[in-house]
């Protein structure tokens, strides 16, 4: 692989603007060759002028890259010294002798156990790996571009410039990063894993950057996806041949609507993840996942395709139950409804156990809102649930149907405006409202989150009003003469305007520029420009799709069941688009703050503890201190 492709595939996305602009420098060389005059005398003068210009740009690149590296290196040294202080207290609390430093004050906010430091140390090690990778990519970039300059310009100035400027620079010194990596490995081995280095490195190391996908995974995914396409085709053809049995098909749609929506949503998330990786959005950091056990998009596609294949096969069996010799097909939809729950709630350490437990913990934090601090994953997953409200209701209706099927012998689920359904539809917006109030209480920008809380409160109002109307009205009443209907319309208008405004302005970060090439957008764009305008229109249209629903139902052009199905699919499409731009906006925020690893809180240091940190930093300038060697031996 050429260095340019290796460089692009291995760089840290959040630091992209701080790397050497290798492609631009290479383009300068090629442009100089194309524009060079043919006469030797003119060419000599031309290349001399170009040499001054090129190396001036290269020197500025080195200054920028080196300054960023020195800043990150100093930040890493201070964090490393802080962790040493924390370990000193833990060793002393356990009865060990740390050092002869007499100024260790009582720790006011100490970590409770070594387990408390494990996640922070593993994340710190990951940040050192990223910094080490940043160092190697840039140093190699300067060597490659200077070598390319000498090759095409037929000069030795590039090699001389490397010796004069790059080799003495801080970024060319590998010892600092390697020393910290070695010290973290030793500390983690001795203190966290009790001397088991194999176990320690398994927790610290991350998969190699740019690691190719296994051919076995690609083959198995292709097989399952092919089976899904065939079964889906058979299902559609079977459905079309049964259009003369409307009652049976109505039962089919009622029993399998939830499974279809789940399949549709999961495939949209797989596409989201694939595109995020393709454009360089670090979703692993944004969701605060462990980079050591993340699930690749190809594995997600295989799992989703397998679930969808099982569901479509259950649909085919339902449609052709007579041919399969099944007298009662109403139990077949249980497969598609129970399969995701069994997979998610399975306590055995198989089938992506860490990921499943992480999702369940996030669900727990959502349900317990506003008792816990709100992370990005908390409100992102809760927003997904707001788009999947119909699935939550469907699970209740199907469960209710099976109880009634045993008791009264009903043949299909019956839509109902019961209090339970209303409460279920209010739960996701209530959880988001509680999260907004928690963020306001924790000191986030008050106006923004109070406004967002208002949007979810208006969503709850749009759910409650139809329930009250259904309870107090009769079928013979003129709906448009009822003030509740007008209250519902007004609340829907307010809700749609506030939600669309929040999506476009806050979640997408658009409407930052009001003139020029990127009008109505923002300065930095990762997707094609047309996609942002499409997202603006699609978000507004789908937010106001209730207007179409109201007219279709009022003029009896479509049943309520079909209207809800179309609206649910439209909402999943809107959330699919929303995921692209919401993650992009968060990624750009991380890029602006050069945040490439998770911020894991350990505990604060008081002024006297800061003195100990400064003491260790002073000692580390001349190598490992005697106190640190004593810390190693005591551990």
Image (cartoon, helix red, strand yellow):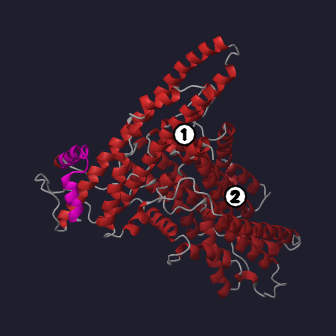
Q: Residue 54 lies in what quarter of the image?
A: top right
Asked if residue 564 lies in the magenta stretch, the reply is no
Q: Which residue is mark 1?
A: 509
From the viewer's perspective, tell me whether residue 450 is left or right of residue 254.
left
Cα separation, mark 2 vs mark 1, equals 25 Å
Please indicate, yes or no, whether residue 335 appears anywhere in the rendered image. yes
Vertical order, 493 against 153 (above or below): below
Q: SS class of the residue under badge 1?
A: loop
Q: SS class of the residue under badge 2?
A: helix
Which residue appears at 72% of the width and 77% of the height? Answer: 412
Residue nearest the observer in this picture, 202 or 117: 202
Please indicate, yes or no, whether residue 117 appears anywhere in the rendered image. no
Q: Quadrant of the C terminus?
A: bottom left
Range of magenta residues: 609-634
Q: Are marks 2 and 1 in contact (CB under 8 Å)?
A: no
Vertical order, 406 against 296 (above or below): below
| Farthest-out residue, top | 41
Badge 1 local density, few (<14 within 10 Å), some, or many (20+)?
A: some
Magenta: predominant secondary structure element? Answer: helix
Whichever of callouts 2 and 1 sits on the residue coming sooner in the sequence is: 1
Q: Residue 331 lies in what quarter of the image?
A: bottom right
Residue nearest the observer in this picture, 474 or 450: 450
From the viewer's perspective, tell me whether residue 196 is left or right of residue 102.
right
From the viewer's perspective, tell me whether residue 5 is left or right of residue 368.
right
Q: Which residue is mark 2?
A: 569
Residue 275: image x %, image y %? Answer: 63, 50
Residue 237: image x %, image y %? Answer: 86, 68
């Amino acid at each position: 692989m050429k260095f340019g492709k290796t460089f692009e595939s291995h760089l840290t996305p959040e630091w992209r603007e701080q790397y050497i602009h290798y492609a631009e420098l290479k383009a300068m060389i090629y442009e100089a060759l194309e524009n060079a005059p043919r006469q030797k005398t003119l060419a000599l003068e031309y290349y001399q002028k170009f040499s001054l210009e090129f190396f001036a740009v290269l020197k500025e690149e080195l200054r920028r890259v080196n300054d960023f590296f020195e800043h990150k290196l100093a930040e890493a040294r201070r964090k490393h010294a802080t962790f040493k202080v924390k370990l000193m207290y833990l060793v002393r609390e356990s009865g060990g002798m740390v050092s002869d430093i007499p100024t260790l004050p009582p720790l006011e906010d100490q970590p409770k156990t070594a387990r408390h430091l494990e996640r922070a140390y593993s994340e710190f090690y990951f940040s050192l790996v990223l910094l080490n990778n940043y160092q190697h990519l840039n140093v190699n970039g300067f060597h490659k571009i200077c070598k390319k300059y000498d090759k095409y310009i037929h000069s030795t100035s590039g090699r001389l410039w490397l010796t004069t400027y790059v080799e003495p620079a801080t970024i060319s010194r590998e010892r600092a990063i390697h020393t910290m990596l070695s010290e973290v490995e030793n500390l983690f081995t001795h203190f966290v894993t009790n001397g088991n280095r194999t176990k320690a490195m398994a927790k610290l190391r991350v998969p190699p950057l740019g690691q190719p996908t296994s051919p076995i995974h690609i083959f198995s995914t292709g097989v399952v996806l092919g089976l899904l396409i065939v079964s889906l085709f058979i299902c559609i053809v079977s459905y079309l041949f049964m259009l003369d049995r409307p009652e049976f098909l109505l039962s089919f749609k009622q029993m399998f609507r939830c499974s279809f929506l789940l399949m549709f949503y999961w495939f949209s998330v797989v596409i989201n993840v694939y595109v995020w990786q393709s454009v360089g959005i670090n979703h692993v950091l944004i969701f605060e996942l462990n980079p050591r056990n993340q699930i690749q998009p190809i594995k997600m596609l295989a799992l989703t395709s397998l679930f969808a294949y099982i569901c479509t096969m259950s649909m085919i069996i339902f449609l052709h139950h007579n041919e399969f010799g099944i007298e009662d097909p109403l139990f077949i939809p249980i497969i598609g409804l129970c399969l995701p729950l069994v997979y998610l709630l399975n306590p055995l350490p198989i089938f992506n156990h860490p990921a499943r437990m992480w999702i369940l913990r996030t669900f727990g934090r959502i349900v317990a809102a506003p008792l816990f601090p709100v992370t990005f994953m908390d409100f992102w997953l809760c927003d997904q649930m707001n788009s999947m409200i119909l699935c939550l209701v469907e699970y209740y209706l199907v469960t209710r149907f099976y109880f009634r099927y045993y008791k009264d012998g009903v043949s299909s689920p019956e839509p109902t405006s019961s209090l339970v359904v209303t409460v279920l539809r209010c739960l996701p917006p209530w959880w988001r409202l509680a999260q907004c109030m928690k963020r306001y209480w924790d000191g986030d920008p008050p106006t923004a989150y109070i406004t967002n809380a208002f949007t979810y409160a208006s969503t709850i109002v749009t759910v409650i009003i139809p329930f009250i109307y259904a309870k107090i009205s009769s079928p013979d009443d003129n709906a448009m003469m009822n003030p509740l209907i007008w209250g519902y319309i007004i609340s829907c208008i307010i809700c749609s305007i506030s939600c669309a405004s929040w999506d476009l302005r806050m979640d997408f970060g658009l409407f930052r520029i009001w003139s020029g090439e990127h009008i109505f957008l923002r300065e930095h764009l990762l997707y094609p420009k047309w996609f942002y305008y499409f997202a603006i229109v699609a978000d507004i249209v789908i937010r106001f799709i209730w207007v179409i629903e109201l007219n279709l139902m009022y003029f009896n052009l479509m049943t309520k069941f079909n209207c809800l199905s179309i609206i649910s699919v439209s909402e999943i499409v809107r959330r699919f688009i929303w995921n692209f731009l919401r993650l992009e906006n968060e990624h750009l925020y991380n890029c602006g703050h050069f945040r490439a690893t998770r911020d894991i809180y350990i505990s604060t240091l008081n002024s006297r503890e800061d003195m100990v940190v400064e003491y260790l930093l002073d000692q580390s300038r001349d190598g490992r201190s005697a106190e640190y060697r004593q810390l190693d031996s005591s551990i």
